[in-house]
């Protein structure tokens, strides 16, 4: 298994990735914004995608979107092919795309929105914290990407203040602070349980 930054040699996986995203949305019954093969190709060509490949088989994918002139970076389209799920591949892909984001956009706030518990857990382990949507990009183009999600009406009814997704944010200089607060909190809980 290889997890690599996408390049032109991976373009032929675009249709498979797009279909995998669609099928996952149907299977989970939750909101996942659809991505066309053409959109995925653009992300791969500009070096803002991470792909997992097992031999010549597609295994997983995630990409970076840049908003407000590099002030914000979003990770989107995290998907693992069904036969590779439950093996930690999503976490490895997410870690690789996170590292790519830090390298390419070192001062950016990194965020994502998700309904998936597993993705929330991965984000939390990387130092993200849950935030109100007002702390995320206000770029209307980002929010247009939600139009293909079945829960889009919730987002529009609330004037983009909330949805079924959870917004999660990693601030570039906040990693140590949030981890030390979390550690202190967990240590406090542990001490209470053992008394």
Image (cartoon, helix red, strand yellow):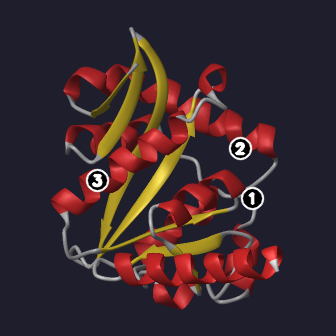
**Residue 40's image quarter?**
top left
Question: Which quadrant holds residue 185?
Answer: bottom right
Say which residue label 3 marks: 99
Q: Nearer the viewer, mark 1 or mark 2?
A: 2
Mark 2 Cα-neighbour bin, 10 Å: few <14, some 14–19, many ≥20: some
Q: Which of marks 2 and 3 is nearer the N terminus?
A: 2
10 Å crowding of disc 1: few (<14), some (14-19), many (20+) = some
Please give the name of the residue rendered at 32% of the width and 43% of the height, measured from the top-left corner: 49
Tell me, for residue 25, which label it has, or none: 2
User: Which of labels 3 and 1 is toward the front?
Assistant: 3
- For image coordinates 41% across by 29% down, the residue present is 14
**Marks 1 and 2, the one that precedes in the sequence:** 2
Tell which of 133 and 178 is nearer to you: 178
Mark positioned earlier in the residue sequence (3 or 1): 3
- Dots 1, 2 in contact, CB < 8 A: yes
* Up-down relation of residue 25 to residue 53 (above or below): below
Name the secondary structure under disc 2.
Answer: helix
As helix, strand or loop, the secondary structure at mark 3 comes to helix
**Could you tell whether 2 is left or right of 7 in the image?**
right
Label 1 belongs to which residue?
150
């Amino acid at each position: 298994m290889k997890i690599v930054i996408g390049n032109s040699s991976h373009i032929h996986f675009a249709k498979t990735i797009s279909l995998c995203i669609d099928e996952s949305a149907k299977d989970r019954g939750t909101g996942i914004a659809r991505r066309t093969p053409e959109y995925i190709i653009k992300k791969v060509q500009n070096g803002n995608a991470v792909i997992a490949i097992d031999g010549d088989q597609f295994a997983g994918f995630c990409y970076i979107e840049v908003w407000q002139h590099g002030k914000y970076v979003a990770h989107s389209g995290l998907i693992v092919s069904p036969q590779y799920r439950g093996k930690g591949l999503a976490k490895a892909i997410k870690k690789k795309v996170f590292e790519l984001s830090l390298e390419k956009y070192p001062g950016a706030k990194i965020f994502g929105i998700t309904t998936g518990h597993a993705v929330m857990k991965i984000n939390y382990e990387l130092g993200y914290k849950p935030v109100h949507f007002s702390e995320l990009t206000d770029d209307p183009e980002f929010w247009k990407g939600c139009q293909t999600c079945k829960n889009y009406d919730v987002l529009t009814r609330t004037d983009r203040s909330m949805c079924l997704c959870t917004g999660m944010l990693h601030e570039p200089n906040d990693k140590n602070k949030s981890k030390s607060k979390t550690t202190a909190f967990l240590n406090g809980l542990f001490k209470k349980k053992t008394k």
